[in-house]
Amino acid sequence: MERIIKFFKIKNPARVKKWIYILTVSALAFWVVFRITMLIIQHNQNVYNLSRDVMENGTPVITITAQNSSGTLHEPITVEKNKAYVTGSRVGLFRAGQKVGGGKIVSVSQNINLDTGMYVIKTSNVGDGLQYVEYTRNGYFVPVYAVVDSGVYVYENGVAELRKVIVAHSDADVALITQGLHDGDIVILSKVSTGEKVRLIESK
């Protein structure tokens, strides 16, 4: 700075220094504002592009392809001294030989216990407490969260449509559907609404 003042023989160096300082600060402020403005514009473009992509191509969804098959469900029972009691609406789920809590069921009563009004299940090598009986059924198995309003969403002609189904059994993880689905139906697992335009990104 001093060399510049001497070279140009500036008579009022203090004033020149002041103006150089003002210009430097102004340039720096302009650059900061410019960068912030560009970042905001870029962000808005990204948001806009994402919204436009959904509108043009549909909401990306995860799906599974329905296939009639054999699967395993788990039914809870409370065991005490290798004995459990179940209601008449559930007794048909159990039979001798089924696996439960490291052991198995050895018998299922066909008659109501007069003392409890329930059916007696006898087990072998099963600890006391809440246990889960494995049982096998045939049908269409979907994650239990895919069932909404007594139906599941399926992919049809690029949109999501709610298909009414009959759920025969379910546990904490899966639901067994016996009516309403066919082999090859594409069941949507993502959250959607009826008539929403969707596109398939992943199939489980």
Image: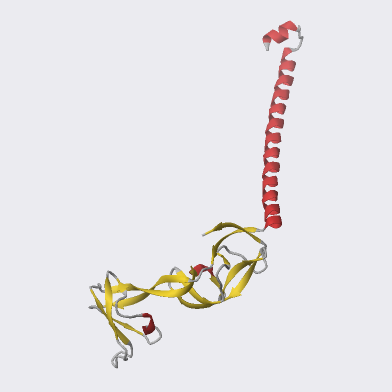
Image coords of residue 98 (percent x, y): 32, 75
Image coords of residue 73 (percent x, y): 40, 72
Q: Nearer the viewer, residue 131 or 39?
A: 131
Please give the count of numbered marks on the rendered protein: 0
54 above or below 25?
below
The color scheme shown is secondary structure
Q: Residue at x 33, y 88 (%)?
A: 118
113 above or below 35?
below
Q: Quadrant of residue 159?
A: bottom right
Q: Which of the image's four quarters has the N terminus?
A: top right
Q: Nearer the viewer, residue 27 or 112?
A: 112
Image coords of residue 141 (percent x, y): 48, 70
Q: Quadrant of residue 112?
A: bottom left
Question: Is residue 97 shown left or right of residue 15?
Answer: left
Question: Is residue 39 shown left or right of residue 201?
Answer: right
Q: Nearer the viewer, residue 173 or 117?
A: 173
173 above or below 107?
above
Image coords of residue 56 (percent x, y): 71, 56
Q: Residue at x 33, y 91 (%)?
A: 117
Q: Quadrant of residue 80?
A: bottom left
Q: Residue at x 41, y 85 (%)?
A: 89
